[in-house]
Structures are given as C-alpha cells and as structure tokens.
Amino acid sequence: MSATQEHRILLGRRTVVVAVGAAGAAAALTACGGSDDPGGSDAVEQPGSGGGGKGGDVLAAASDIPEGGGVVFAAQKVVVTQPRPGEFKAFSSTCTHQGCAVKDVSAGTITCPCHNSTFDAATGSPTGGPATQPLPAREIVVEGDAIRLA
C-alpha cells in the first residue's frame, strides 16, 4: 500500500469518527437543551394528560372576573372572560396575528395592544384588526367560587 493510499484510508476513518462524534454531541445537546414546550414543574396540566386530581391551581375567584369583561393571567398564558352572568370562558392569551399577549378585556371584547386586533369575549373569534384566526379555547373548571384550568 502506498503512502497516498494509507493517508486516504486514515483520512476516511478520521472523517467517520469525527462525524459520528459530532452527531452524538448534537443529540446530547438537544436532549439537554431548552424547548418551546411548556413542560417542567410550573407547567399547567392540559386536559387528557392523565394527571388526575382537580386540575391546575386556582386562577381566580369567579367574583374576580367582571361581567362583560375578563382577566388575563400572563403566567398561565390564558384569558378568562365572563360574557354573561355566571358564564365563564377561557382562551389562550396569545394573539393569533403575531403572538403578542392580549392585555385588555372589556365590553365583551379582548384586545391585543400590538396591532389592535380584537376578539369576541364569548367565542374568541376575531372581530377586528389584522388577526383572522380565533383565540384557541382553554378548558376551565368552576368549583364553587374557584376557577381552575382543567
């Protein structure tokens, strides 16, 4: 075997070893790295996730949600509304236009401050502005005066 052939074989083996090592390192970093998934100890349990119990922590007292208005819970990324007396609805607080957080709920309207998209507080459907998709519904449970995420 000539020196050139021997060099090519070594270079080929070295390339394979480096590539396999890089792929392994990438897999390890991916497993340890962050994620957009809201998992972790402060995650809100989603319906059907098998956690049992009475759902998430209490968001608010029903009496804290104004009739015709609502409250945005930034940490949980949810907005809870009371479109009619005793009727409570919940939606994602992330605007479907460009992902800003909605900030205000009054007179039956949820408003996003970024581009003034508005949504119906009873259905989450867009009523104005650039947003064309409704706010996704979130499940809540009303137990006595306590409102919890389901």
Image (cartoon, grey):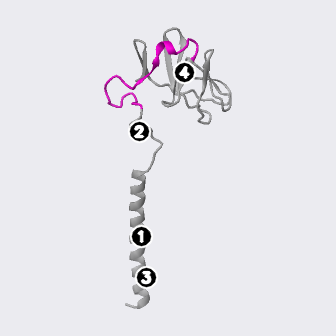
- Please state the horizontal and vertical placement of residue 52, each as a whole percent of the image: 31, 26
Decide if residue 4 is on the left or right side of residue 106. Answer: left
Which tag is nearer the camera, tag 4 or tag 1? Answer: 4
Residue that numbered label 4 is attached to: 71
Question: Of the residues shown, which amino acid type is indicated by label 1?
Answer: Val
Residue 22: in magenta span: no
Residue range of the region highlighted in magenta in the rendering:
44-69
Q: Is residue 68 above or below residue 90?
A: above
The image quadrant where one finds the N terminus is bottom left
- Residue lying farthest to the top in this orientation: 85
- The CA distance from mark 2 to mark 4 is 24 Å
- Mark 2 crowdedness (10 Å alpha carbons): few <14, some 14-19, many ≥20: few
Question: Of the residues shown, which amino acid type is indicated by label 2?
Answer: Gly
What residue is at 43 percent from the left and 50 percent from the top?
33
Residue that numbered label 2 is attached to: 39
Mark 3 vs 1: CB contact within 8 A = no
- Of mark 4 and mark 1, the one earlier in the sequence is 1
What residue is at 59 percent from the left and 28 percent from the top?
102
- The CA distance from mark 3 to mark 4 is 68 Å
- The CA distance from mark 3 to mark 1 is 15 Å
Q: Is residue 67 above or below residue 40?
A: above
Decide if residue 134 is on the left or right side of residue 58. Answer: right
Which tag is nearer the camera, tag 1 or tag 2? Answer: 2
Question: Of the residues shown, which amino acid type is indicated by label 4?
Answer: Val
- Mark 4 crowdedness (10 Å alpha carbons): few <14, some 14-19, many ≥20: many
- The CA distance from mark 1 to mark 2 is 33 Å
What residue is at 38 percent from the left and 37 percent from the top?
41
